[in-house]
Image (cartoon, rainbow, N blue to C red):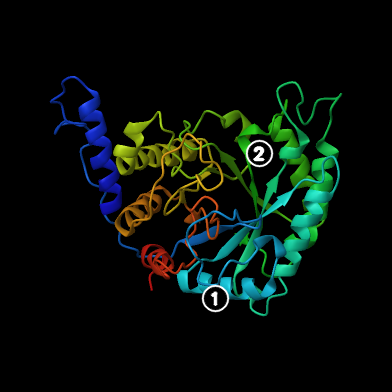
Amino acid sequence: MKKFLNIIFYTSIIIFFGCEESNDPIVGEDHFLNYEVESVPVTQDYDLGAFYFSGNFDPDFVEEPTLGRYNPADGDPGIYNSHIEMAKQAGIDFFIHSMRTSAFGSTGYQIDSTIVANLMQAPNASDVDFALSYNFAFMQLGNNNRVDDPSFDKVPLVLNDFENMKHFFNMPNYKRVNGKALVYINNGAFLFANDNKAVYDAIRSAMNADGIELYIIGEQPEWTPPLRYDFRFVGGVDAVSHNSYITVTRNSIDRLLLFEQYVDQALTIAKNDLEQIGLEYIPQVSPSYNVTYVNPNNGNFIVEKDEESFRTFCDIAQKASSENRIILVNSFNNWNFDTQVEPAQSYGSKYLDILRDEFKVN
């Protein structure tokens, strides 16, 4: 929290000297955002997942992993062996791995499936479950190129992708929710279709034919109203998850200054609204964010790691979780965006320990 308050302090100085005159506080005493988020005691374990980064590290990121600068794209079982032990320390129940579509060539799928297959060779891989995040970006969907348009029809390709993933779904350590294989739909809000429910029905039907039931999570952008994309999800997915709210654009200073209160309100509303239309809500938490390593000119604020702030973020997520108590950590090891909880030389295993404290009974 101290680092976060430093951001507020220096930002306030800029605002103060940038304005001719203002004696008004950011929020008045009687303002509905004038409160502190209460700590939530853990009386029952949460089902904790974490996004696992398998791309190439940017050479300019600052922190030093305790494992050294490994290459996630290698899919090294030895590194994964260490990551599994870290996950067990944190109480992480499953990792989520990217799986790109085979659209316009199978390179993406081949790379991702090979990485996951290699990681599963780690001696202790079965100690932590895994799930797949389906990425259909290379289909180049849009309003004029809908996945089920007769002239563009990519539904057979989607079904083929799921057929390719089937052998992962059948692995004993594949993540299941009430017996159903969990699949995360990356950018699910942008699965452009004339009838999204029919597309998901086709996927489920194809998998059901092989005895596989799916628990599907649709992703939508951070800071968007929970029902903005309901027409993409209702009747098709089981749950919705906002991408982590840790991303705050520089034209939204209020969201940074009152981050905890804004996110508390937003996630609570998302849970209530989505549950009313029959969908679970799955909150995401992140300890920090800094994308300047990859893109120095990006338009987002840097949010530094801070123990108290991260604990509060976790408290917010606890209250916003639905019946299955699933919460996602974004991320385990994306050092490019500085969202990682993986141990570093500078902060050790602090953020692994926080996860266990916040989401597990012991």
Q: Secondary structure at mark 1?
A: helix
Q: Position of residue 156 (x, y in %)?
A: 85, 39
Answer with the quarter of the image where residue 76 lies.
Answer: bottom right
Disc 1: CA contacts within 10 A as few (<14), some (14-19) or many (>=20)? some
Quadrant of the frame with the C terminus = bottom left
- The residue tagged 1 is 85
Q: Nearer the viewer, residue 47 or 238?
A: 47
Residue at coordinates 38% horizontally, 70% vertically from top-left?
361
Mark 2 burial class by Cα count in 10 Å: few <14, some 14-19, many 20+? many
**Would residue 357 appear left or right of 245 to someone viewing this image?**
left
Which sits earlier in the primary sequence, circle 1 or circle 2?
A: 1
Q: Is residue 267 left or right of residue 60?
A: left
Could you tell me which residue is drawn at 85 percent across and 48 percent down? 106
* Residue type, label 2: Gly
Q: Residue at x 65, y 39 (%)?
A: 236
Q: Give me the disc on residue 347.
A: none
Q: Which residue is mark 2?
A: 236
Q: Residue 161, percent across and down? A: 80, 48
In the picture as drawn, the residue positioned furthest to the bottom comes out as: 123
| 22 sits to left or right of 38 | left
Under circle 2, the secondary element is loop
